[in-house]
Amino acid sequence: MTRKNAHLLRLLFVLNPVSGDIDKGHLEDELTTFCTERGRTAAFFHTTGEDDLGKLRQHLADHKYDAVFAAGGDGTVKLVAEALLGSDMLLGILPLGSGNGLSKDLGIPQDLDAALRLIWEYEIREIDTMLVGGHFSAHLADLGFNALVVERFCSGDTRGPGAYIRIALQEYLNYEPCTYHIETDRETFEGKAFMLTVANANTFGSNMVINPDSRLDDGEFELCLIEPFPNTAMLGILYQLYNENFDASAYTRRLRCRRASISVPGQQQVLAQVDGEPIELTTPIAIEISPRSLRVLTPAPSSGAE
């Protein structure tokens, strides 16, 4: 649904001061000036890491806005999306984090000035969200190797793709794949997996395409498995992932479903990452889709006047 002629005048920007490697010291002043020059009103909510979700929900209950922009990385987007879940409020994304995975899948420009055009030139897209072990997810969740790398990355002092690659190489040498038992509304699987991704979308923030040809609004999600592989196959698998060819490998498979339950024999809790945030989940992990439960601003297909 397109609303090019509906003006978004009252805007809330949710700012995460520590996402990515971007200096946000002057961002609030820049956004205020940008909005004022275009007849918009800008308000700000700063995350602190202390009950951000509850405080944001209360703020939104006390104030009226036409749209709420997440100005940060995937964690900030997750926070704002969860606060808006099931409402008519519009989510905008200003990708200012290390990965910005959901914004890339939605085709949102990664340049701040270009992304800000969503204030006056946009389409509204209703996308699916997920519950993964009771935790909200709008994009991707992981068990296995990538969850471990994300946990190490988040606990480190360095951001950016270089730090992620360095950690991944270090952990790869000693990583032991787990055995997973999966039951979906369509099929079952049991076996070892190097990595298991719960995918509502396509692409990691690193531009690795884990779930090609899927849609954010089809009422389904995919379980994308990379099974244990010899060292000699690693470069080939990486090449296929970066070239949207996940299904070509003998070590990959996808299970498409609406509901799933994942167990790890012998483990009551497992490390996971949900939209870029590491977390411990209790098994069995129940996963379900919430069809078209989030309204997002995405670029309009053609240019329009301000």
Image (cartoon, helix red, strand yellow):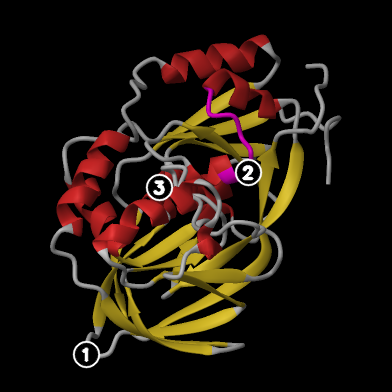
Few, some or many residues within 10 Å of mark 1 (<14, 14–19, 20+): few
Residue 215: x, y in percent? 67, 58
Residue corresponding to mark 2: 106
* Disc 3 and disc 2 in contact, CB within 8 angstroms: no
Query: Is 194 on the left-hand or right-hand side of 246?
Result: left
3 vs 1, front mark: 1
Say whether residue 86 is left or right of residue 7. Answer: left
* Residue that carries the numbered disc 1 in the rendered image: 266
Is 108 magenta? The answer is: yes
Q: Is residue 305 above or below residue 84?
A: above
Q: At x 51% / y 82%, what residue is drawn?
A: 260
Is any part of residue 246 visible from this angle?
yes
Q: Is residue 62 visible?
A: no
Instruction: Single out the residue that lies furthest toward the front.
Output: 232
Q: Which amino acid, by three-letter code, is at mark 2?
A: Leu
Q: Amino acid at mark 1?
A: Gly
Which segment is the magenta one? 105-111
Disc 3 target residue? 75
Is residue 132 located in the magenta-colored stretch of the structure?
Answer: no
Say which of 295 and 195 sits in front. Answer: 195
Q: Looking at the picture, how far across and down is residue 144, in whole percent?
A: 30, 68
Q: Is residue 159 left or right of residue 257?
A: left
Looking at the picture, tell me which residue is in the foreground, 215 or 168.
168
Q: Residue at x 83, y 40 (%)?
A: 2
Mark 3 residue type: Gly
In the image: residue 292, left or right of residue 146: right
| Label 3, label 2: how far apart the Cα atoms are | 16 Å
Q: Main secondary structure of the magenta part?
A: loop
